[in-house]
Image (cartoon, rainbow, N blue to C red):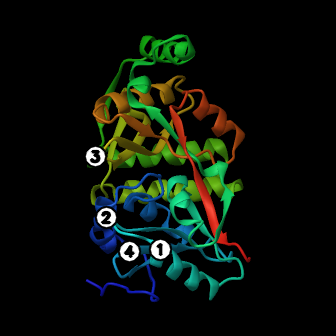
């Protein structure tokens, strides 16, 4: 086991860091989708995440390719004023545009004014948070189309809900590869990055604190999803993929996964839309209870 990194010495995030980092999320349950070890781990190659401890706080930085580094909000059970200051000080020494991204709005309200930080809206990264009961029951006129999709799928196919285990991981990977061929991922860097993240989550599934499930038709995986508890009242869905040739498969994995794995949680967080219009329309069509808004913080004199 490597030594724990201490500020200002950051180290690249790896699987062996899971317990230390997860301990901070247990002490201070996160409000937004980025702050779980699974999420950080599966996206670590794209964002080049690094971490260290600063007194009793967890600091995380990242960067995309040759872009300037950025910080994620400090995590800790106590006052984070010093941690915000240390993180910004580090960033100021490594970039002309020091910024902390994906900051929960409530955290920004607590620290921005006292630390003289400018607050920038970041709607593309707002998490969509639903009442889990609504995603399970799909009651009312507004969910009429969703219920029809479920009805048609169940009428057309004999399927089973399968908790994800070792012998189904390969089938999920094959579905992801098939999906990427259909969507021409090689021509779309964003989809290629997503494919890499999904593969990382699946290949290390049993070493991560997540649960998974699949929809199986004739011993073929036609949809799968991975999630985990975000905090005591919210489940987080990290990813969801379905075979577009099986109409209604997205609706079925969404409803079945919530019903079988997350019914004890009041809310289900289905992450952000990244500013993509199609994804935004899809997420809005399930009528979120609220958005978990995030902002960007930066020094006012920049």
Q: Residue 148, position in %: x, y?
A: 52, 12
Classify the position of the C terminus by image quarter: bottom right
Q: CA distance from mark 1 to mark 2?
A: 21 Å
Query: Which residue was labeled with disc 4?
Result: 57
Q: Which marked residue is nearer to the observer: mark 1 or mark 2? A: 1
Query: Which secondary structure, mark 4?
Result: strand
Residue 252 visible from this viewpoint: yes
Q: Residue at x 50, y 40 (%)?
A: 241
Q: CA distance from mark 4 to mark 3?
A: 39 Å
Q: Which marked residue is nearer to the observer: mark 4 or mark 3? A: 4
Vertical comparison of 19 with 185: above or below: below
Residue 50 visible from this viewpoint: no
Residue 66 versus residue 168: which sits nearer the camera? 66
- Residue 167 badge: 3
Q: Earlier in the sequence, mark 4 or mark 1?
A: 4
Q: Residue 122, position in %: x, y?
A: 66, 54
- Residue 81 badge: 1
Q: Earlier in the sequence, mark 4 or mark 2?
A: 2
Query: Which residue was labeled with disc 2?
Result: 22
Q: Residues within 10 Å of mark 1 (few under 14, many from 20)?
A: some
Q: Residue 200, position in %: x, y?
A: 43, 60
Q: Residues within 10 Å of mark 3 (few under 14, many from 20)?
A: few
Q: CA distance from mark 4 to mark 1?
A: 10 Å
Q: Residue 63, position in %: x, y?
A: 60, 73
Q: Which marked residue is nearer to the observer: mark 3 or mark 1? A: 1
Q: CA distance from mark 3 to mark 1?
A: 47 Å
Query: Which secondary structure, mark 2?
Result: helix
Query: Which secondary structure, mark 3?
Result: helix
Q: Would you identify the image quadrant in which residue 205 lies?
A: bottom left
């Amino acid at each position: 086991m490597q030594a724990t990194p201490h500020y200002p010495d950051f180290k690249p995030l790896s699987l062996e860091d899971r317990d230390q980092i997860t301990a901070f999320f247990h002490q201070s349950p996160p409000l937004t989708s980025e702050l779980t070890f699974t999420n950080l781990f599966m996206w670590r190659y794209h964002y080049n995440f690094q971490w260290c401890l600063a007194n009793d706080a967890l600091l995380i930085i990242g960067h995309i390719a040759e872009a300037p580094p950025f910080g994620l909000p400090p995590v800790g059970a106590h006052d984070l004023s010093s941690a915000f200051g240390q993180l910004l000080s580090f960033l100021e020494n490594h970039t002309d545009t020091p910024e902390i991204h994906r900051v929960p709005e409530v955290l920004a309200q607590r620290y921005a004014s006292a630390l003289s930080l400018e607050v920038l809206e970041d709607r593309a990264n707002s998490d969509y948070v639903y009442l889990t009961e609504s995603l399970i029951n799909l009651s009312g006129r507004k969910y009429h189309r969703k219920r029809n999709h479920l009805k048609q799928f169940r009428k057309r196919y004999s399927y089973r809900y399968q908790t994800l285990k070792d012998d189904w991981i390969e089938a999920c990977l094959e579905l992801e590869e098939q999906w990427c061929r259909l969507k021409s991922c090689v021509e779309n860097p964003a989809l290629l990055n997503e494919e890499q993240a999904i593969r990382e989550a699946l290949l290390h599934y049993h070493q991560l604190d997540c649960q998974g499930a699949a929809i199986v038709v004739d011993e073929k995986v036609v949809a799968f999803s991975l999630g985990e508890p975000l905090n005591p009242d919210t489940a987080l869905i990290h990813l969801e993929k379905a075979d577009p040739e099986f109409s209604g498969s997205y609706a079925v994995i969404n409803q079945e996964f919530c019903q079988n794995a997350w019914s004890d949680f009041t809310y289900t967080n289905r992450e952000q839309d990244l500013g993509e219009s199609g994804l935004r329309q899809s997420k809005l069509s399930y009528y979120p209870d609220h958005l978990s808004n995030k902002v960007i913080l930066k020094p006012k004199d920049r």
